[in-house]
Amino acid sequence: MPSANEERAAENVTSRDSWRGARGDRGAPTKQCGRPARRIAMHVQSRGRAGGGGGTMLGVPLPLFVLSGIGGDERLFEAQRAVRDVRPINWILPSDPAEPITAYAARLARTLVINEPFDLGGSSFGGMIALELARHLAPDRVFLFGSCRSPRDIAPSLKALRRITAAVPDRFLHPPVMLVPLVARWFGAKAPAHVHLFGEMLSATPIAFIRWAAKTVFAWEGVPELPMPIHHVHGERDRLIPLRSVKSDRVIYGAGHLLTLTHATEVNAFIAERTASLFSHES
């Protein structure tokens, strides 16, 4: 049976005013995290962070806290649980339509309680927020999945998005069922199961969040460097953040923007490789 301390630690990704997209509640704000954070069974004293090499728990990789992209939720990282102890961080709603990413990340950081060494990662917009969160939470390392360090890396055609999302009716920000396959394919999802999941996640995202994120991302100054390592994996066919715009550590050929979902095997291999390198540095 887990101890009282372990049970309290299992709540360390709960954030106030988050929504539970994975539970199909259409994105209504809630006070609870979508799913209890999973704990490593062998919870022992970590090795610490001497030399910035990161820590482990008796050879068990550190937990990997993750943020999904706009229109996503924790299910985007379900396959990555095979190689890491994935802990989703739920989004919170912006305080106002003009809240900068830096202020949002600082406010999100204050809602989180993480009492152990950890890694941080994010997909797309979630990766950008992860970079900003890293300045407040000091993870051992940051993983970027189809993300970028500057808004200049986003496809120029999407820069019209901030004007479009501000003007179009709500119903177009949650596409009709008949249009979901078309939109999903543009994001790189083709398998029926992936298309269906994409539609579910997008429909569960609050309209206010979509409008805010689509606008504020282009005013973001970016995070070119951090004091901890950044590990970046990217899809060759990413239409939102073109490969030519970024300097990634690994390119997954044939993958689009939703690579953690559509090319989980390759993404997991990258994560496992970078995780395994930690052991060699610490041994």
Image: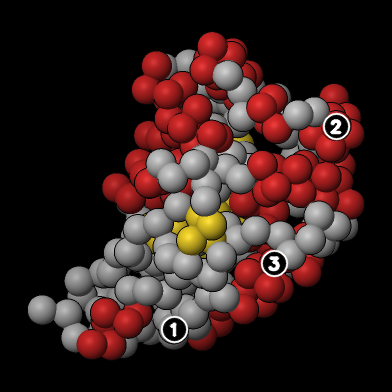
**Residues at marks 1 and 2, CA–CA distance in whole angstroms:** 43 Å
Describe the element under mark 1 as helix, strand or loop.
loop
- Please give the name of the residue rendered at 69% of the width and 25% of the height, measured from the top-left corner: 172
Q: Left or right: 95 with respect to 113? A: right
Question: CB atoms at circles 3 and 1 under 8 Å apart?
Answer: no
Q: Amino acid at mark 2?
A: Ala
Q: Which callout, 1 or 2, points to the residue nearer the camera? A: 2
Depicted 121 relative to depicted 147: above or below: below
Mark 2 lies on residue? 167
Looking at the image, can residue 59 be seen?
no
**Residues at marks 3 and 1, CA–CA distance in whole angstroms:** 19 Å
**Residues at marks 2 and 3, CA–CA distance in whole angstroms:** 26 Å
Placement of the N terminus among the 4 image quadrants: bottom left
Mark 1 lies on residue? 115
Question: CB atoms at circles 2 and 3 under 8 Å apart?
Answer: no
Q: Amino acid at mark 3?
A: Ala
Describe the element under mark 2 as helix, strand or loop.
helix
Mark 3 lies on residue? 105
Q: Position of residue 205 (x, y in %)?
A: 57, 43
Question: CB atoms at circles 1 and 2 under 8 Å apart?
Answer: no
Give the mark, 1 or 2, whose residue is nearer the N terminus: 1
Q: Position of residue 280 (x, y in %)?
A: 40, 65
Q: Which mark is residue 45?
A: none
- Please give the name of the residue rendered at 61% of the width and 45% of the height, measured from the top-left corner: 206
Q: Left or right: 21 with respect to 246? A: left
Q: Position of residue 249 (x, y in %)?
A: 61, 44
